[in-house]
Image (spheres, rainbow, N blue to C red):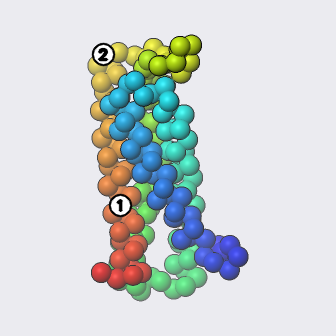
Amino acid sequence: MEFNGLPLHPLIVHVVVVFAPLAGVGGIVYALVPRWRWALRWPFVAAAVIAVIGAILAVQSGLWLENQRHLQSLPGMATHAYRGRILRWMLIGFLVPTALGAWFLGGPSPLISGAGGRRGVTGVLAWGIQVLLAISAVVVLVWVFLTGDAGARTLWGQ
């Protein structure tokens, strides 16, 4: 998988490196700041979906690159590949609290028309969704860092 003679993996990885943290930070803010939900709802969901698509493509292009360039023998490559596969599944799983949050958590809108604001669930269900969303967002942020760090250390050392 190449684009203009360059391996596609380093290019696609940047999609994940940008959108997974955006989705993670968006998830934390969305869970904890109800007054911003009206503005964050769709950008947050879009970032999570783009991160998933990027992760799926990054794993596929990474496997191709690893086999094409015979990179299996590099120290740390197995760790990076393992973390990349786990990250893909984490991001797919992160779509669940993302969807639950976008669907069930409401918040006010500062607009005079009230556009974007909506009533959501309250009580234990809302609290549970907020906690699930915030915790899973933190896990995604940590795992993105660990995966990228393993890849960088594999190729660039130290």
In the image, residue 2 lies at what x, y percent?
66, 74
- Which one is in front, 59 or 44? 44
- Which one is in front, 148 or 60? 148
The residue under the point 35% across, 52% down is 141
In the image, residue 132 lies at what x, y percent?
33, 35
Instruction: Give the SS element for disc 2.
Output: loop
Q: Is residue 36 above or below residue 119?
A: below
Q: Is residue 77 above or below residue 107?
A: below
Instruction: Give the SS element for disc 1.
Output: helix
- Which one is in front, 91 or 41? 41
Question: Which residue, given by chain and number where applicable, does mark 1 sit on?
Answer: 145
Residue 104 falls in image quadrant = top left
Question: Which residue, given by chain and number where applicable, does mark 2 sit on?
Answer: 123
Q: Quadrant of the N terminus?
A: bottom right
Q: Is residue 66 above or below residue 125?
A: below
Residue 125 in sight in this render:
yes
The residue under the point 41% across, 86% down is 73
In the image, residue 28 lies at what x, y percent?
35, 38
Q: Nearer the viewer, mark 2 or mark 1?
A: 1
Residue 82 in sight in this render:
no
